[in-house]
Every structure is written in structure tokens, then in C-alpha cells.
Image: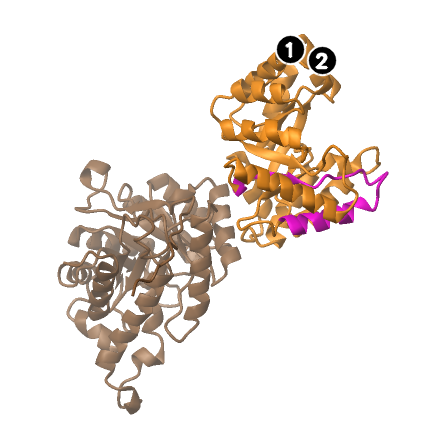
Chain colours: A orange, B brown
Amino acid sequence: MILIGERINAGFKDIARAIREHDPGPIREWARKQAAAGADYLDVNIGAASKDPADMEWLVKVVQDAVPTPICVDSNRPEVLEAGLAALDGRPALVNSTTADDEKLEKIVPLAAKYEAGIIGVAMDERGSPQDVERRVELGAKIFAACIDAGIPPEKIFLDPILMPIRFMQDQAMKVLEAIRQYTMLSDPPPHISVGLSNICSKAKERSLLARTFLVMAMAAGLDAAICNVMDKELLAAVAAAEIILNKEIYSDDFLKVWALKRSKGGG
Amino acid sequence: MGVEVPDVKESFPQAIYTVTIGATPEQGGTRTKVVTVGGETTLPFHTFEGEIPHPPAVAMEVWDIPGEDWPEVVKEPFADVMESPGKWARKCVEEYGADLICLRLVGCDPNGADRSPEEAVRAVREVLEAVGVPLIIWGCGVPDKDNEVFPVVAEAVKGENCLLGTITQDNYKTLVAVATAYGHKLIAESPVDINIAKQVNILAMDAGFPLEKLVIYPSTGALGYGIEYVYSIMERTRLAGLGGDKLMAMPILCDIGKEVWGVKEARAPREEQPEWGDERLRGPLWEATTAYMYLLAGADILVMRHPRAVKAAKETIARLLGREG
């Protein structure tokens, strides 16, 4: 399971302030905490705090000076994405994200190819977020094809079927699970499949329980990546158990220790 | 007619740990040679797709007391030396080409000769002086007695970098401590159970023992006695290890001789089983065939008894690796 730490995002007030004031302290702290918790990638997002590509460059440099963890450069602006990618020191990276919009595909997919980064493709377009399985699959397949045409191999493509808040759109989670199943049949080897996990519990009570329950259900459907709260110990324990149940890891009584060992060495 | 053969080569992200047994005088021991196993980056004998830097090694079994219950066929080659572990070991090395000696401290068994730790040390020293190859030292298998014997034996052979065994899920703390203190490697035993195999390794690691100094002993079944269960466990262990599971990437040891010479197909004399043919041929053949199967399953160390079976196994290893004479 590929876990992408969600916390360095200007949606959080401490990070927004740190970006505006160029205060590296909170960013370093969250980089270290999430890396220690076992994140495979750290998402970095300047969000609404800034539109200046130079701020993304600064943010990426602060994070990579703090930890060796690969970075997931997160923005919907191509120029901001490129500033982040150009600042990288050669470690593996992810571009987060393109949509199925032709305009986005034309600008963002070549960036991932140019910097040899992986790319997250979100199954939406100029018409908005899909409400059914078919549209999710159609848009996912369109992104997948555009990436392959640009020379990006399947193992660097991450498709996101778009998770909706259970609080407001309860019928969507089942449709996402089915879209995940269908994504696994797009190619052999299949692309990675990722979600922004915290969407499911937006504005809900019992956020942690909803997130981890959905995550293990999605893993059974074929999900193998998530942008999530890697500081949630119960979430990570549920992932460890799910990997055992899905027979991706040989069972031992101390499988949680094995998980911790793998995570502490980065990767898994 | 030209037939296109598809490329089926696979590559794996992790190599099996490389384990060296024995130490030369420069390394703090007294061995004239050391044996290194493991290091492979692919499945057994898949030399077309990966590296197999060290061939599987063959250890020959020597006891600290004469092997009274060994069948005549396998006792005969050692009849003149069984009274002396040193002479026995020397014959294995000089006449039969053993890569290692596996000294089994059967005499320490409290239900048998119940020898003292000091007597065990004498047997170990005798073997060390008689041969230059590295040693595997295998306890009597009674946990309390092994825990009494190994601290003394391990200290006596400090610096020799022996392979000591075995640790199990229920008995590992003493052996881990003495192997750490005196610089030895360990055999991690499990009862034909891959989950326990992994668990023993976790327990050793948790007790501070490096995973890279362990050898997995998944238990061994003779041909006709559960060999397919062990085979599939070894195969899955090896695939997990090569696939990146750090707790399963150890070399694997198979205890062939002890198992084979306990089954009737190898033991029974012709008079009892006339249709099975001459036991002088059948017994060694049973041992050799069992060894072949385990080589294909991923064995890195074979512990064997009969000289003819040893010769056959060594020839097969060389042939399969393309390293014939």
C-alpha cells in the first residue's frame, strides 16, 4: 500500500501561515512526523495560501531538506507544479494532479513525463465530478491513455475515481468501489489506484472510523494508494491487517511489528 | 522452423542474505576455509535471469556419540571412525568432500547418554582440530538441556563463526544471547509452518539478533513423507524473500540425512522388502533424490549422511549451475 501523507497542505491553518511567512518550522515538523509514521510520499500543497510558483519551490526545498521521503507535488496550476518538480533533488516524485480535461492533460501530463515523475489522474473534467461508475471509468481510461501516449508507464500512473463525502452523497462510495474494480482491468500490470481518503469523512463525526473502514473495503476492490492521515495509528493498523487478509504479506503473530519494521525503513 | 520464444525472465527487488560460516585465523577463528551461502537474486538454478553467487553447500553429519540407530548401509562407511567425532569428521571432509561438518550433540540428550556441557565441548574441540571446514553445531533438541549446553559450547568456540541450532518460537532467548556474545550464526526452526517461520525470525530480531545472520530451517520431510508441504513452504518463503520481505530473505537449510534414514523406504533390508531391491543402492538413492527436490525448492545448505548421496548431490549442484569439473 502506498501511503501519501496529507498534512503539508495550506488547507491547514498552521501550514497556510508557514507558507505565507516562509516559516519552515511547522513544515519540517510535519515532514518528519509523517515520514516517521511511515509515509511513502509527502503531499505538498500551497493551496489558496499562494499562487506564486516560487512559494512551491520554497516549500519543496524545505520538505526535502528535512526528510528523504519522496514528494507528491500538489497543485491545480501547471506553473506551480513545474516549480515544485524543478526544485526536486532527484528523489521519486508524484504530480498531483491532472484531470481528464483536454487542456489539463495537454499541460500536466508532459510535465510528469519531462520530470520522470508519477502522476495522479483525477476522474473529472470540465463538466465536473462524475456521479456514476461509467463516467468514472471513461474519464479514468482517457487519462490512462493520455499518459501512456506520453510515454509514462502504467506503474507510474495513479487513477483517482473521486471520493465524495459520505455525509452528503452516501450513494457514491459504492460507485467508487466498483470504479476501482474496473480500473484494475485497464491494463496488465494495472495502474495504481489512489483516493483522497479524507474526502469520505468530510464534515462527518467518526471521521477516523469511516476513513479506515472505507480504506480496507477499497483495498479489497484493488485500491493500492491513498492520500491520507498517516498519523492515524488505527488507520495504519487496519491497512496492515488488510494486507495480511489480502495475502499480500505472509502472516505472522507479530505482523504489526513487521509492518512497523517495513515502514521504518521506508517503503512497502 | 523458427519459433519465437517469449522472454520470460523475471527480476526480483531483493537478494537473499549472504551468510558466511566459519572464520580463518585472520578473521579470529582457526578454519582453513569458510563457506558462504545465499546472495541469490533469483529462484533456484535460474541462472538465465539472476545471480547465484554461491552454490548450495553440503554439510555431512557427525555425532558426538556413535550413531547406534543408523542403518547398516549408512553406518558402514563410518564404522571405523564413529567412536571418534574428530576421525569421523576428517573422513567426511578428506574422503567424501564435505563442505561443512554438522556436529549433532545427540549425546547430550537427557533421555539418552545425558552428557555434560563439558563433554560436548570436548567433542566440538575434537572436530575443530581434526578438520579445517566450518561447523554447524546442532543441539539435542531438548530445550532445557540445549540452554545449558550452548552457553558453554558457544563460548568454547568463540570467534569460529559457527552456525548454531536451533532456535524455535518457544526457545530462542538463550541461543540468541550466546550467539550474539560469541559471534555465531543461528538456525531458526519452524514445524512446517510458514507463519511460525516468520514469527521465529521476528522474535530473534526483537531480541536484537540481525536478520542477516539467520538461516531458516523449515523442517524437512523425506521423499514420500510430506516433502510437498515443505517444498511449497520453501518456495513461498523464497518468493517472499526475493519479493522484498526482509523477514523471509534468509538462506534455507534442509536436514536431509536424519529424515531419510528414518523412513522404511531407505532403511528396510532387501530380506524384508524383496520387491524394493538392494538397500545398498536404494538407501543412498532415496537420500540423493530427497536432496534433489530440496535443491529445486531453494535449499542453500543440505545436511546429509551417505557418501554416495553426498557425491550425487554435489555433482547435481555443479551440473545445474553449469560449473561441472
**Residue A2 magenta-highlighted:** no
Q: Residue at x 60, y 41 (%)?
A: A144
Residue wearing tag 1: A23
Q: Name the foreground residue: A43 vs B194.
A: A43
Q: Name the foreground residue: A215 vs B112.
A: A215
Instruction: Specify start and end residues of the magenta stretch as a single range.
Output: A154-183
Q: Name the foreground residue: A93 vs A217.
A: A93
The spot of residue A253 in percent (x, y) is 58, 52
| SS of the residue under disc 1 | loop
Mark yes or no: residue A92 visible: no
Q: Residue at x 16, y 63 (%)?
A: B96
Examine the image and state in which quarter residue B280 appears: bottom left
Name the residue type under label 1. Asp
Query: Do pointers 2 and 1 mark residues of a single chain?
Result: yes
Relative vertical location of residue B19 with respect to residue B87 in this rendering, above or below = above
Circles 2 and 1 in contact, beta carbons < 8 Å? yes
The spot of residue B53 in percent (x, y) is 28, 47
Examine the image and state in which quarter residue A209 appears: top right
Residue B205 as seen in the image, left or right of residue B23? right
Q: Name the foreground residue: B276 vs B208.
A: B276
**Residue A165 magenta-highlighted:** yes
Relative vertical location of residue A80 with respect to residue B255 in this rendering, above or below = above
Mark yes or no: residue B115 visible: yes
| SS of the residue under disc 2 | helix
Residue wearing tag 2: A17
Relative vertical location of residue B107 with respect to residue A202 in this rendering, above or below = below
The spot of residue B225 in percent (x, y) is 41, 74
Residue B197 as seen in the image, left or right of residue A47? left
Which quarter of the rendered picture does the C terminus of chain B lie within? bottom left
Q: Earlier in the sequence, mark 2 or mark 1?
A: 2
The spot of residue A254 in percent (x, y) is 57, 48
Q: Residue at x 63, y 13 (%)?
A: A55
